[in-house]
Every structure is written in structure tokens, then in C-alpha cells.
Amino acid sequence: MKSILKTCTALTMVATFTGQVAAQQMLQSLGAGEGEVSIVAWAGYIERGETDPNYDWVTKFEADTGCKVTVKTANTSDEMVALMNEGGFDLVTASGDASLRLIAGKRVQPINTALIPSWSTIDERLQNAAWHTVDGTHYGTPYVWGANVLMYNTEVFGDKPPTSWNVVFEEQTLPDGKSNKGRVQAYDGPIYVADAALYLMKHKPELGITDPYALNEDQYKAALDLLRVQRTLVGRYWHDAFIQMDDFKNEGVVASSSWPFMVNVLKAEGAKVASTFPEEGITGWADTTMLHADSPHPNCAYMWMEHSLSPKVQGDVSAWFGTVPSVPAACKGNELLTDEGCATNGYEEFDKIRFWRTPTAKCEQGECVPYYRWVSDYVGVIGGR
């Protein structure tokens, strides 16, 4: 970390007078990079053109900085936390249900925003967000954000797309005349309890749920009961994006919570799928690039965080994954995202999304069910208990 601290004053001066490009040049001229950077990331977040040559925000970074990027794909937030606990990584693209756990566990370190010249370009709604800022200290750089959409088969639903999450929570006959039993999926992660709670907010208002991540014992029990009903309908609990895509193509799955990434890839392949925001509302994620407390390559890590905020990268990631950039400037002039992309992906829906965060015992209600209970009980639900 000493070398990055030595560059701080010079970098800040350069950034002040000549901006982002000069700041990166200063880092390079000082030989700040250690030659590599390792990132724990969601599938599709770090692309080098191997899946589609149009989507590559790694190759040029490596050429410009000399920092070779390696990626460890994680399928759930719990897996990300486990990997960061093991160590050996520099960065993680953590969602809100992992970020505060990583901060509390001292697995990530505060960042020096002076070393990130593009920090000032971040959406003001995200700069001081509660999932990466504690007592005014920033523990990461916002990456992209988005929603957990309802993906469905357009041949099955025809001209009547689903308007409610009930197609995955309650047994029913779908527009093709067949039951949904065995043809729907649910997310294989404890945070999915919040999706059940969000559904109950509309369908059982007498429970008094106002926050799907802050549930008292009665509210939590109702959510688990709903998930146990869902268990009788689910053909597979998904956590691997590519397996879910295969299930929609080849295994008869017709409706599930999903990410825009899978919707976009399947559409590009010609699959008969679409997505919607159901009437009950949606959960979502605002992901943060966080620096490991014992990062072996902090200089390259800081250069990656700066690189990740460039409008080009932000726009390309958002076009590929179906997300919204954390840098509003990326919403205009990006060939892949197009000028309509941010609106399409939900830029104006920010206040309507219930972003993932870690449930805690202390809440506005007084006492709520903490996350460790969500973990053990959801395992039980999946196991049929």
C-alpha cells in the first residue's frame, strides 16, 4: 500500500488540473501497477470479449496499465463473502446484502477517493449510499445497479404477459392451459426471503410489512410459509446464470426471478423470452467495487476502480448486463447502450426498487429476524422443511 500512498499527493494535483486521463498517465509513469489484479465478480461483470467481441472492457485496461485481470465468478452474495474471508483477492463487486457484512467483518478497507479522479462523476444518489458508506467513510466505488426482473416465456404467455409474482408463488394454470407446477424457478439465496416479503406487502397488508429486509417474527413466519408453498412448484432453485438460461431453453422453465443479463443473452440467441416489473414491486441490487483489507495489488486495484467509472465502461457493462450506470454521463453517446438504454433499464425507477441489504436484529420495529436465521431457514425451505 505504501506505493499507492506515495502517489496520492501527485495524483490528486494532476487530477485537479488536467483530469482523469492525466491522472491515469501519472499512475503509469510512476510505475504504480504491480502487474495484476484479481476480482471476485458476478457473472458477466468483467468481460474481455470472449463471449461477444463487442463487449470488452478488460483488454485495453491491461494494455494501458500492465495490470493483468483475473476473475473469480461468484453466484451468490454468500459465496462472495466466503471468498473474501478466504483472502487472496483484490476486489469484489459486492451487492448490498454482502457489503455491510464485509465492512463489519473487516474484510474490506476504506478507499481514498482522492485516488479515484472520476469519483465526482458518480450519480449523487449513489455517492454516499448506505450499503458502502459507514459514518461518512466510503468502502467502495459504485459499479452498476439494476432490478430482479420476472423473466417469462413469451410463447407460453402469448399476448398476456404476467403482471404479478403470483406465477412463481402460487399454483395456477398458465395461459397455455398447463399448470405452473415444476415450470418455475426461485433464486437460490437467503436474500430471496425479501421477495416473498415484498409479495406479502401487497397481498397480506394486515401483516404490516413496510420493509422486506426488516421482518418481525410473525412477518418472517408468513414469508417462510409462502416460500414453503413455492417449494412445491419450483423445478430448480437457480444461482448460476448460465444454467438458468439453459433451463429456459431446454428444460421447460417458463417463469422465474432473473437478471436482465440472462434476458438479454437469451434474446440475442433468439429465445422466446421477455421480462417485466410485476405490480407488487421488485427487489434489486446496487453493486460496489470494494477493496480487500489485505489486497496484494492495491495499485492495480485503484486503477481498475478508476477505469470502471469511465463512461465507456459504464455504458458497455450496462448494455451487456441490462443494468443502469453509476455514472450518468454513460447514458448518452454509448453505441451499445444507446441513448434510450438507461431509461429502458430503469434509470427513473431507482426509488421504486427495494435494494438488497443485510437484515439485522435491530430495526425500526425494534427487533427483527437477523440474516443468520434467513440463511439457515432458507436452506431448510429448499430442503423441504
Image (cartoon, rainbow, N blue to C red):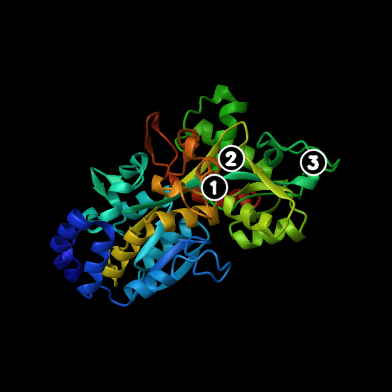
Q: Nearer the viewer, residue 329 or 5?
A: 329
- Percent coordinates x, y for residue 138 in the rendering: 27, 49
Instruction: Name the residue: 14% across, 67% down.
Output: 6
- Asked if disc 1 and disc 3 are in contact, CB closer than 8 Å, the reply is no
At label 3, which amino acid type do we have?
Answer: Gly
Instruction: Name the residue: 63% across, 38% down.
Output: 226
The kind of secondary structure element at disc 1 is: helix
- Percent coordinates x, y for residue 127 in the rendering: 32, 44
Q: Where does label 2 land, which residue?
A: 224
Can the viewer see residue 212 in this picture? no
Image quadrant containing the N terminus: bottom left
- Percent coordinates x, y for residue 47 in the rendering: 50, 66
At label 2, which amino acid type do we have?
Answer: Leu
- Asked if disc 2 and disc 1 are in contact, CB closer than 8 Å, the reply is yes
At label 1, which amino acid type do we have?
Answer: Asp
Q: Where does label 1 land, which residue?
A: 377
Can the viewer see residue 60 in this picture? yes
Q: Residue furthest top?
A: 206
* Distance between the alpha carbons at the discs numbered 1 and 3: 37 Å
Residue 11 lies, with reference to residue 343, above or below; the image says below
Q: Where does label 3 land, which residue?
A: 158
